[in-house]
Image (cartoon, rainbow, N blue to C red):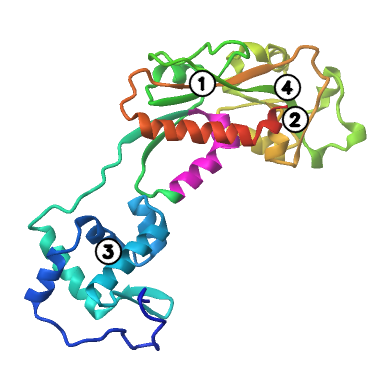
């Protein structure tokens, strides 16, 4: 639909005028600001203003305002709706053809996005940060982002990234990345407890001591075997001669707890993420804690773009601070 006129009757193209000579359209196209020309071409290609705005990394309201000004300047309707589908009017098709022809004569500006490498602890990525990262990419389809999942201390030491979010000791960022980083920022302190699915354990019959775990299958995420704060849990698992399963996938461990009546060690906040899981406090006399740490690469090249991710992560943890209370 044109920005200048109410919706036309189906099949009627607004501002329908006799087709102008190619030379006239070429002159009109040449006078359009290159950035506005790009807005028009991307919108024509996407057939959707929202998707075009995502691709251009601008707000949809700004895009539609610029296209409305273009139509007003040309005194021609460039878009129309055929049913529910956005398409180009006859004049829009003529303008598109000339802009494409001009593109071979002059380079329309391409907004290159820097590649940002973000490394995140697998549990944090799955439970806390994933949804906000998806929302970020839904708003900005032109972003270039590599997301690296940290599933072990070894992978943390081996990687290189612009921004890294990892789990270290409660009072120290160690073990941390092997590359040079700026001052690490301490985020949430995370307590860990054994968990079970509510549907497999009535409140009155839930285990309240280590001895009560004898009749339950334990599931161990292999990444946790070398974590020093998890020594009470790991010692229990290692002492088992039966009734234990070791997995190499965090998601699979969650499924084993949800669907196989297993008990596994999980962050205490997990019941906020999945209300079907419940903690089993009091089984161990020692607390099991880690802390999330955030740091930027000391040699980061794209400061502004990386800082946007830092702000997103800080906002995410602030919004969920009651998860870690």
Position above or below: 40 against 188: below
Front: mark 3 or 2: 3
Predominant SS of the magenta segment = helix
| Quadrant in the rendering for residue 258 | top right
Q: How far apart, in angstroms, are the residues tagged by discs 3 and 2?
A: 54 Å
Residue that badge 3 annotates: 40
- Image x and y of residue 281, in percent: 81, 24
Q: Earlier in the sequence, mark 2 or mark 1?
A: 1
Which residue is identified by label 1?
A: 152
Q: CA distance from mark 4 to mark 3?
A: 66 Å
Task: Kindly report the distance in space between the C-alpha atoms of the residues bearing marks 1 and 4.
Answer: 26 Å
- SS at circle 3: helix
Would you say residue 51 sits in the magenta stretch? no
Query: Which residue extends farthest right?
Result: 204
The span shown in magenta is 120-138
Q: Are marks 4 and 2 in contact (CB under 8 Å)?
A: no
What is the crowding at mark 4: few (fewer than 14 residues within 10 Å), some, or many (at least 20)? few
Query: Which residue is more in the foreground, 63 or 283?
Result: 63
Of the image marks 1 and 3, the number of the one nearer the N terminus: 3
Q: Name the quadrant of the N terminus.
A: bottom left
Q: Alpha-carbon neighbours of circle 1 within 10 Å: few (<14), some, or many (≥20)?
A: some
The residue labelled by disc 4 is 242
């Amino acid at each position: 639909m044109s920005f200048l006129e109410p919706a036309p009757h189906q099949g009627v193209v607004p501002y329908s005028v006799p087709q102008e000579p190619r030379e006239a359209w070429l002159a009109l196209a040449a006078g359009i600001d290159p950035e506005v020309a790009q807005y028009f071409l991307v919108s024509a290609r996407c057939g959707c203003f929202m998707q075009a705005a995502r691709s251009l990394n601008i707000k949809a309201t700004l895009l539609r305002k610029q296209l409305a000004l273009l139509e007003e300047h040309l005194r021609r309707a460039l878009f129309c709706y055929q049913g529910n589908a956005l398409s180009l009017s006859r004049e829009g098709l003529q303008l598109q053809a000339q802009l494409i022809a001009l593109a071979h004569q002059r380079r329309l500006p391409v907004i290159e996005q820097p590649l940002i490498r973000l490394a995140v602890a697998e549990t944090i990525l799955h439970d806390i940060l994933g949804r906000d990262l998806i929302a970020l990419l839904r708003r900005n389809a032109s972003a270039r982002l590599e997301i690296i999942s940290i599933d072990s201390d070894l992978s943390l030491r081996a990687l290189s990234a612009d921004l890294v979010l990892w789990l270290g000791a409660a009072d120290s960022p160690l073990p941390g990345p092997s590359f040079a980083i700026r001052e690490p920022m301490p985020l949430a302190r995370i307590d860990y407890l054994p968990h079970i699915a509510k549907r497999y354990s009535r409140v009155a019959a839930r285990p309240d001591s280590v001895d009560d775990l004898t009749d339950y299958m334990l599931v161990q995420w292999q990444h946790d075997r070398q974590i020093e704060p998890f020594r009470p849990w790991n010692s229990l698992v290692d002492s088992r001669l039966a009734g234990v399963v070791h997995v190499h996938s965090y998601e699979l461990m969650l499924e084993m707890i949800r669907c196989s009546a297993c008990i596994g060690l999980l962050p205490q906040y997990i019941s906020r993420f999945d209300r079907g899981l419940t903690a089993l406090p009091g089984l161990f006399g020692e607390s099991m804690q880690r802390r999330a740490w955030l740091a930027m690469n000391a040699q980061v090249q794209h400061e502004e773009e990386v800082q946007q991710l830092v702000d997103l992560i800080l906002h995410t943890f602030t919004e969920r601070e009651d998860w870690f209370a």
